[in-house]
Amino acid sequence: MTFSIVARSADGKALGVAVASKFLGVGAAVPAALAEVGAVATQSYANLAYRPQALALLGTGVAATETVRALIAGDAGPVEHRQVGVVGPEGPGATFTGEQCHDWAGGAAGDGYAIQGNMLAGPDVVGDMEKAWLAGADHTRLAYRLLAALRAGDLAGGDRRGRQSAALLVVAKGMGYGGTSDVWVDLRVDDHPDPVAELGRLLEMHSLYFEFPDPATLLPLTGELADEVAALLAAAGHTGPDLDESLASWAGVANLEMRIVAGSIDPLVLAELRSSGGAAG
């Protein structure tokens, strides 16, 4: 009924889950992750207790493979219908598919990832997801690599019943809003005719609004550029003796405060300022 990938970034700092299903609000049931501990996806007659149980085991140093074994061994319910994937802060991921999961059902796992799905169009869903994951080794942002793998599964047929929801959860120490949270990305498409595509659109928006700017791309706020920015800000009613303060005030209204760096301007902020003519609200 669902296909997912649970994985760790190449540098080991981020952990996450991407999932899609013909199921309402799949993001509320399947994924869980904890920074520097691990990530888990529970599906196919999902046992939601697997989420805290898996993270608790991983948090004590139990490897992903042993964690999956412990989850299945301790489950008093219909394990033959269960499916689960787990990844820890190091080592290979692990996946389990009960022998009575609806066809086609199966999974694949390797260093830092586990992919699983049930009631799929065929084995190519998992196979193409794995190929996409392995081909994305150069991705520096885990969320985009996970999404690429999920999209590959969707294009291969995904859930054979159709499309409805998708979700993306990524955690990393201090990478949440304002550096005050470890939840880097938490996006859900609960009911949509093309949920994976919609998830991609939301991720692009999330990157704009909630990621820190790339220091290498920052433009010095001096000379003609400073004059242009000041004029645009004035048109929006954000004026004052300090250009940095005026820009920060505008950015707060435009929800771009994460991208403000004193003395400079992020090209993405500049593009938004120019496109809006200085308007915000």
Image (tube, rainbow, N blue to C red):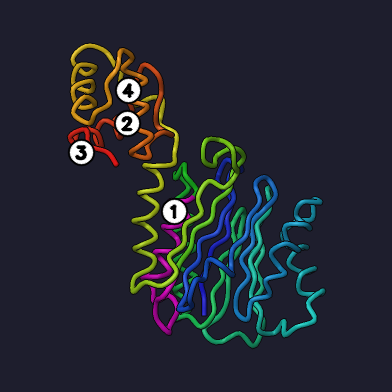
Comparing 234 with 120, the one in front is: 234
Cβ atoms under marks 2 and 4 closer than 8 Å? yes
Cα–Cα gap, marks 3 and 4: 16 Å
Residue at numbered disc 1: 135
Q: First in sequence, mark 4 or 1: give its number.
A: 1
Count neighbours of disc 4 (C-alpha within 10 A) and say few if under 14, some if 14 to 19, many if 20 or more. Answer: some
Quadrant of the frame with the C terminus: top left
Q: Earlier in the sequence, mark 1 or mark 2?
A: 1
Q: Position of residue 231 (x, y in %)?
A: 18, 22
Q: Are marks 4 and 1 in contact (CB under 8 Å)?
A: no
Q: Which label belongs to residue 34?
A: none
| Disc 3 residue type (three-letter) | Ser
| Residue annotated with mark 3 | 276
Residue at x-position 41% and y-position 23%: 261
Q: Above or below — where is 170 with respect to 262?
A: below
Residue corresponding to mark 2: 250
Left or right: where does residue 7 sit relative to residue 151?
Answer: right
Picture residue at 47% right of the left edge, 70% below the top: 20
* Magenta stretch in the rendered image: 143-165
Residue at the spot 61% in from the left edge and 59% down from the top edge:
110
Amino acid type for the residue under numbered disc 4: Ser
Residue at 40%, 52% (x, y): give it: 203
Residue 259: horizontal and vertical position, in percent?
A: 40, 32
